[in-house]
Image: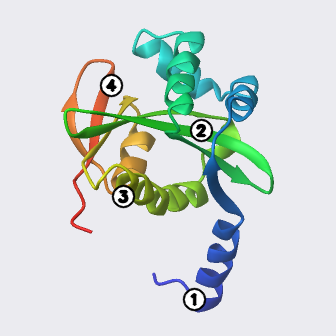
Amino acid sequence: MDKSPVLRSMETLLEDDMEARTATPQDLSHVFEHLAARMSQDYATVGETEGKAKEHLLMDLKEGRGHALVEKDETLAVITWHENDDVAYTSFAADEEFFSAKTVRFCKRHIRKIQQLCGNIPIRSVSRNRPDVERWFAVIGFNKIAQSENGATFELPASRA
């Protein structure tokens, strides 16, 4: 069923409350103080501790490759990236409030901005096996390119922008 123009307009206003800005170490600390349990589980599934995950994110931040995803002055998530072999790999941390339809729609637009910053190369993300995660990646535009017992690798194809 199509949404009414009023409903679409209200969703856009809600999405406009979100913004991305250059992330700071303080943003990262804030997110890890409120880290969603699902993020801890994701890190453990791939054999990483929260401390190690935070270190990896911090290294990308120090290179200027990280954004804080903010809603109403509250940092909900940090996404970072690094390039290797003509692919940009993302790392991510978020609190539980971040996981909603509205933020997925925001990320759909924002990941394209990150892709532009990287020269429009493919973007890859690895996540734990969960049906909701696969659906979110699909909505954002990613394709599943690999599957293992513990997780899946998703790729946003190179942009022709």
According to the image, label 3 marks what residue? 116
Residue 115 position, x and y percent, is 36, 53
Mark 4 element type: strand
Q: Who's the residue at 63% across and 24% down the image?
A: 37
Q: Who's the residue at 63% across and 74% down the image?
A: 11
Gap in angstroms between the C-alphas marked 3 and 4: 27 Å
Q: Residues within 10 Å of mark 3 (few under 14, many from 20)?
A: some
Gap in angstroms between the C-alphas marked 2 and 1: 33 Å
Label drawn at residue 78: 2
Mark whose residue sits in front, 2 or 1: 2
Mark whose residue sits in front, 3 or 1: 3
Mark 3 element type: helix
By what rule are the colours in the image chosen? Answer: rainbow
Q: Amino acid at mark 1?
A: Ser
Q: Amino acid at mark 4?
A: Gly
Label drawn at residue 151: 4
Up-down: is 20 above or below 130? Answer: below
Identify the mark nearer the N-term, 2 or 4. 2
Mark 1 element type: loop
Q: Amino acid at mark 2?
A: Val
| Quarter that holds the C terminus | bottom left
Label 3–label 2 contact, CB within 8 A: no
Identify which residue, 78 or 63, lies in the foreground.
63
Would residue 6 be found to the left or right of residue 141 on screen?
right
Label 1–label 4 contact, CB within 8 A: no
Q: Amino acid at mark 3?
A: Gln
Gap in angstroms between the C-alphas marked 3 and 1: 32 Å
Residue 29 position, x and y percent, is 72, 26
Identify which residue, 56 or 148, lies in the foreground.
56
Gap in angstroms between the C-alphas marked 1 and 4: 38 Å
Would residue 17 be found to the left or right of residue 21 on screen?
right
According to the image, label 1 marks what residue? 4
